[in-house]
Amino acid sequence: MIVVNCPNCGPRNSSDLRPCGEVTTRPDPATASLSEWRTYLYLRENPAGWVTETWYCRSGCRRYFTIERNTATNEIRDTEAS
Amino acid sequence: MAKHGYTYSAGKLVKHGLTRGDWPRMWSRPEARSSYDVVIIGGGLHGLATAYYLAKEHGITNVAVVDKGYLGGGGSGRNTAIVRSNYLTPEGVAFYDRSLSLYNSMAQDLNLNVMFSRRGHLTLAHTDSALRTMHWRAEVNKLQGIDSSVIDPQEVKKQAPSLDVSSDTRYPILGALHHPPGGIVRHDAVVWGYARAADHLGVHMLQETEVTDILCEGGEGPDGKGTGGRVTGVRTNRGDISTPAVVNCTAGWASLISNMAGVPLPITTHPLQAAVTEPCKVFLPTVVVSGSLHVYVSQTDRGELVFGASVDPVGTYRVNGTLEFTEELAAHVLELMPGISKMRLLRQWSGLCDMTPDYSPVMGTTQVDGYFVDVGWGTYGFKAGPVAGETMAETIATGRDADLIAPFTISRFTEGDLVGEKGAAAVGH
């Protein structure tokens, strides 16, 4: 079981939340080229180690927040709520 | 088959049975050369099949297959051994059907019994929308000459009498997609067969050899990697090997290897859990899949029920099992087959799945010259092993993406030309 700390609801089983993947930088849709936009849409770092990712508290406060998780060990450390 | 290999036969079985002599080792453990024509990263089914077809069909035998562990220790030894070709897209159907026909003739081709059991495959529909997708798939399949049709609950009961097809269950069975050519194969034997045949043709299999970097020159990224670059070799824990062609045939670590060449992939890695029961008398004649209940089940020749599920939602490289999986699995399987409530699970395990956004693989040439990918195999890598090897070998030998895999190249993500296979691949084994 992976326990994730929701900033509002406290520690929850990861199955109560929805993982939304690693945090990426969204290019400006008005100026981004197609290839920049599709890189943002599809390509992922997918590292085996620490990654900053977004979670959604789907069965609690419905808030999106970011955490840091080590994908090799599933160890988790909190960051500033976003 | 092999030019200078040991051939298995009934006569030799009798002879060894009587004399109790040792069987020769299936493959050798050669010393690494300092350079190869092709280096394949990943000694699983895909890597070994690629090596075998490179040697057999294209005469390229100066090939090394490197693996950080042992042959077939990743997805090749962890999958649930199901094969089928009733996919949703015409590209997928043509591709997987070629694989099925290679599985059909594999035992003769490799001179090893891979125990292919062509027992039929049922994909259950529990909702109207699922039934609609089954009809869609059946029509796509029929157009391409695949034996595939939608059957009603009474026919489902005839195919698999242990299923509960009554209408008062939580998820009643409304029908199923029936695919008679589907079945199961002994997955380890497939790995052994390709490894043995490739070894006899002169391919080097270097186990416990971990690639730590891919050496490139001329690319726009750091160290000459990335777009416009050219592969010059690989760095391993046992020293550098120079080569003009590197093939990424890994599953689970595909992104990490690909990042070494400066080629980022559209992949996230998730574990998939599976389990097996104690053996019992054979009662389940077909493969049964339920997308809505996230489970697929088949019975091995030993009598064990093999279960698989969908991938875990949290992406991770950690492959430990969870209690949630066993609880959910048991609940869903008993929904389908109430009669097996007293059976005990023998063990559970998991493997890593490289998921792509459109549930199709990423194959062929890349923006780096000499770096080829055969990755993104999600939950459908085993059934594609033979055709992946055949088409990757053709692509490497000719430098041009083989026709069957042209829709699956990495450029489809920059061109926005995805091959959406989720309707037939998400849990549909």
Image (spheres, helix red, strand yellow):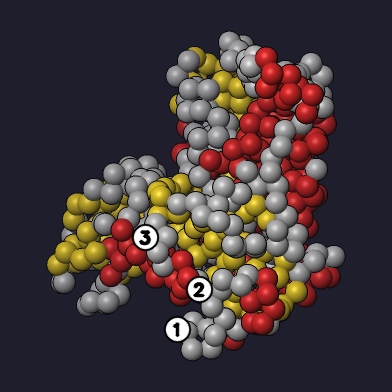
In front: label 2 or label 3: 2
The residue at the point 51 percent across, 55 percent down is: B280
- Residue that label 1 marks: B170
Q: x, y (%) of residue B258?
A: 52, 39
Q: Contact (CB < 8 A) between labels 2 and 1? A: no
Q: Is residue B240 visible?
A: yes
Provide residue B429's location: percent of width, then percent of height: 59, 60
Distance Cα–Cα, label 3 vs label 1: 19 Å
Distance CA(mark 2)–CA(mark 3): 15 Å
> What amino acid does circle 1 point to?
Arg
The local secondary structure at tag 2 comes to helix
At label 3, which amino acid type do we have? Thr
Q: Residues within 10 Å of mark 2 (few under 14, many from 20)?
A: many
Q: In the rendered image, which residue does mark 3 sit on?
A: B326
Q: Position of residue B314 (x, y in %)?
A: 37, 58
Where is residue B89 drawn, in percent x and y? 71, 66
